Every structure is written in structure tokens, then in C-alpha cells.
């Protein structure tokens, strides 16, 4: 990974001409987007439009990708996912990937990393268990429960909470409102807004335009693996 010069106006994440493939299938075409520090940006589109593939390609999880991805002043175009995570980019997959044989508390303890620094030297927010319990009260009540005995929505909260324990400067959040109860959708929205208030950036993929409008500053629309030329500005409800 190489480091580039940055300034206060430089986006935290810049994606240029990003392409990605599953085997021979070309699924992402010349994607270009950026996210500023403390900004919440949504990737909108129907199922199969390429939203999840975009997040995976940024994170280095696609089998093949080309293009340029710069995060926090580092060129991560060819970086491995673990290297990207160490720079402070957190990833919350749609399929959760929690450790079902471990308890809620044990899952969170596995995710702990030291706090990261922003390009200007400021230290990113550092999450404690007490803060996680405040943000997700449901998890506090079941911290000694095995993750296999949780509902799908509760597992989704646990995945987000585990990512926060790594103290990221930015989070890639894949379909946070998909298939979960309305009360958990509200907690997810509050979590995103809390991150924003603390200066942490979020890039989320979402089919639910209401949820996206609730939490995001603006959005990009994807269709068949391409970001539409004119992205729509999304105003956060007051």
C-alpha cells in the first residue's frame, strides 16, 4: 500500500474506475464515488444492482477487481481485507458472519482493535462495551447468550457492534434494514446517526429508500453494476 498526500478537504474514501468480477461475470463497471469524513452516503438500487459487490470490491473481497481505491490517504487498490481493516475501514456484511458458538460478549471481545487516527492526526472515536450496551440495549441483556440462540435481527446488531469494537474511522454497511423487525431498524438508524455525530463516515447499501433518506446525506443509484451519472441528494429528516 502507498500513502498519498491529504488535506482537510480530501475525501476519506475515493473510488475511481472500479470494476469487479465473479469468475467470468463482470458485475461492477467503472464505479466512481467518494465519501467525506463524517458523511453518510447510501448506495441505492434494487436487488442485484451491484450494491453489495461495490462494498466487497472496496474492501478487497472480490475475486478480481481493477481500478483505484484510496482510503485515509492510502492506496488500497491491491490490499488484502485484513490490511484494509487495520487502516480503520470496518465492514458489516449482509450475511452477518458471527461466531455462533461464542457468546455475545465473546464475539465483541474478538473485534477489539486499537483506535485509529484520521489523516489530520485526530484519533477516531473509541468504543467501549458500556457504549455498545447503551447503543444496543438488547445486546446488553443477552451478553452471555450464545449467538446461535439469537434472532436474525439480534445477530445483525451483534455484527455491527463487533465492527464498532474495532474503532473504525469509516464503516461499510451492507443492507442494515434488510429482513429485521421495525424496532431493530430504528436502532440501526440511531447507530448510523451516532457514528455521524462522532465524525465517523458510513457508506451503506440499501434498498429501503425511507431508511436511506432517514440517515444519509446523499446517495448514489446503481443499476446493473453501474452508478448512474446523476446521483440524488438525500436530505436527512429533522
Image (spheres, helix red, strand yellow):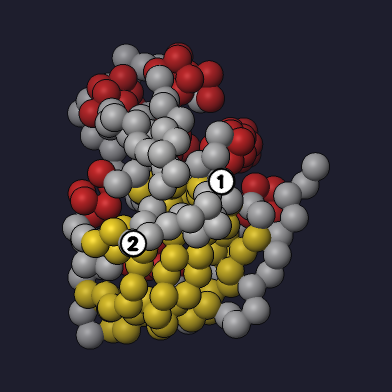
If you read the primary sequence from the N terminus, does the residue marked by circle 1 or circle 2 appear first?
2
Disc 1 and disc 2 in contact, CB within 8 angstroms = no
Residue at position x 51%, y 25% in the image: 136
Q: Nearer the viewer, residue 13 or 207?
A: 13
Q: Is residue 125 above or below residue 131?
A: below
- The disc placed on residue 173 is none
Q: Residues within 10 Å of mark 2 (few under 14, many from 20)?
A: few
Percent position of residue 42, x then y: 57, 59
Residue at position x 50%, y 59% in the image: 10
Let me know if residue 192 appears in the view: no
> Where does label 1 land, which residue?
38
Percent position of residue 153, x then y: 47, 37
Which quadrant holds residue 183? Answer: top right
For this view, does 96 lie left or right of residue 193?
Answer: left
Assign the C terminus to one quadrant of the image: top right
Q: Nearer the viewer, residue 158 or 129?
A: 129
Percent position of residue 9, x then y: 55, 57
> Where does label 2 land, which residue?
4
Q: Is residue 72 above or below residue 148?
A: below
Let me know if residue 110 appears in the view: yes
Assign the N terminus to one quadrant of the image: bottom left
For this view, does 177 lie left or right of residue 115?
Answer: right
Q: Residues within 10 Å of mark 1 (few under 14, many from 20)?
A: some
Residue at position x 62%, y 64% in the image: 219
For this view, does 21 lie left or right of residue 9?
Answer: left
Which quadrant holds residue 128? Answer: top left
Percent position of residue 16, x then y: 41, 75
Element marked by disc 2: loop
Amino acid at each position: 500500500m502507498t500513502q498519498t498526500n491529504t488535506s482537510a478537504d480530501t475525501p476519506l474514501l475515493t473510488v475511481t474506475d472500479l470494476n469487479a468480477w465473479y469468475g467470468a461475470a463482470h458485475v461492477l463497471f467503472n464505479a466512481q464515488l467518494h465519501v467525506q469524513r463524517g458523511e453518510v452516503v447510501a448506495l441505492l438500487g434494487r436487488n442485484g444492482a451491484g450494491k453489495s459487490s461495490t462494498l466487497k470490491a472496496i474492501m478487497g473481497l472480490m475475486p478480481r477487481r481493477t481500478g483505484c481505491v484510496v482510503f485515509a490517504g492510502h492506496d488500497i487498490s491491491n490490499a488484502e481485507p485484513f490490511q484494509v481493516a487495520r487502516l480503520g475501514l470496518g465492514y458489516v456484511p449482509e450475511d452477518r458472519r458471527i461466531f455462533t458458538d461464542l457468546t455475545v460478549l465473546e464475539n465483541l471481545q474478538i473485534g477489539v482493535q486499537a483506535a485509529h487516527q484520521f489523516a489530520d492526526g485526530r484519533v477516531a472515536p473509541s468504543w467501549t462495551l458500556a457504549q455498545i450496551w447503551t447503543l444496543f440495549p438488547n445486546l446488553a441483556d443477552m451478553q452471555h447468550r450464545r449467538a446461535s440462540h439469537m434472532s436474525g435481527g439480534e445477530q445483525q446488531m451483534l455484527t455491527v457492534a463487533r465492527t464498532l469494537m474495532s474503532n473504525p474511522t469509516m464503516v461499510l454497511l451492507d443492507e442494515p434494514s434488510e429482513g429485521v423487525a421495525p424496532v431493530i431498524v430504528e436502532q440501526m438508524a440511531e447507530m448510523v446517526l451516532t457514528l455521524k455525530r462522532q465524525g465517523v463516515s458510513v457508506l451503506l447499501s440499501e434498498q429501503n429508500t425511507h431508511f436511506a433518506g432517514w440517515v444519509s446525506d446523499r446517495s448514489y443509484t446503481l443499476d446493473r453494476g453501474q452508478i448512474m451519472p446523476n446521483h440524488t441528494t438525500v436530505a436527512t429528516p429533522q
